[in-house]
Amino acid sequence: MRSLHTLLVSICILYAATARAAEINVFAAASLSDVFTELAPQFTAATGHTLRFNFGASGALARQIKEGAPADAIFSADELRVDQLEKAGLLRPGTRRTLLANSLVVVVGIEGAAPVSTLPDLAKPGVRRIAIGEPATVPVGTYTKEHLQKTKLWPQVIDKCVPLDNVRAVLAAVESGNADAGFVYKTDALISKKVRIAMEIPREAGPSITYPGAVLKDARQPAAASAFLDWLAGPAAQAAFAKYGFAPVR
């Protein structure tokens, strides 16, 4: 009888845990895909919640949310897109937080690398095509254009620039040799064995690249999504972010 009672209690506990577990629909910047994919099973083991990701350019993700796409949380590669969602009343008040920072780098291929060691080198004849994110919708492209304008180089390189859908597309263009150089985040450059960092734009001199996250107003799993944000601020997640090259927010 005691064994039966113990079994029933165990079943009830398991059922209760399963009932509380949720699937969280997370819209996240493409540059977070590797680290989030690694962290997902750890989060599930810690909480019982599972994660479903939609990775892409932050501008495209914000547009999808505005058009009614079901999302519980968003993690953008810039503050602008989350600002837009907040102004539109699409975030749950008090859930927004900035978790990470990154830096902008110029990459070239390992083989037959373009002669680039400084930004002005991009304007020289040896560099014919420069891959960048689409400035209007892709944060890495917005950061790139702003910095090139700040350094007065934009007019000299604009005709060489090839705008692409997201930062991983920029990386792939340089890896394949379809572009001589490209502007990506440092974290993306570090995961590739086919490119090298030709130069890094210091965070002090370059754009302020931060990653805010927030729970959406119409989230189907708001409590679980908030738990995910909290967990990402913890030691296990922060150690993984550091491993992939992300910096803490100052």
Image: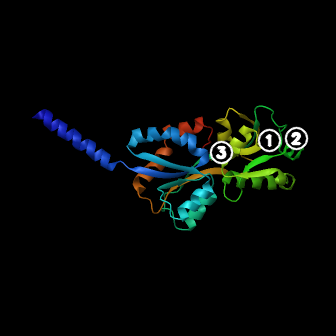
Say if mark 2 contacts mark 1, CB within 8 Å. Answer: yes
Q: CA distance from mark 3 to mark 2?
A: 24 Å
Residue 109: percent from left, percent from top: 76, 36
Q: CA distance from mark 2 to mark 1?
A: 9 Å
Residue 205 makes an appearance in the image: no
- Residue type at mark 2 is Gly
Q: CA distance from mark 1 to mark 3?
A: 15 Å
Name the side, left or right, on which 171 lies relative to 10.
right
Residue 69 makes an appearance in the image: yes
Residue to which mark 2 is pinned:
126
Q: In the rendered image, which quarter contains the N terminus?
A: top left
Say if mark 3 contacts mark 2, CB within 8 Å. Answer: no
Residue to which mark 1 is pinned:
180
Q: Earlier in the sequence, mark 2 or mark 1?
A: 2
Residue 150 falls in image quadrant: bottom right
Disc 2 element: loop
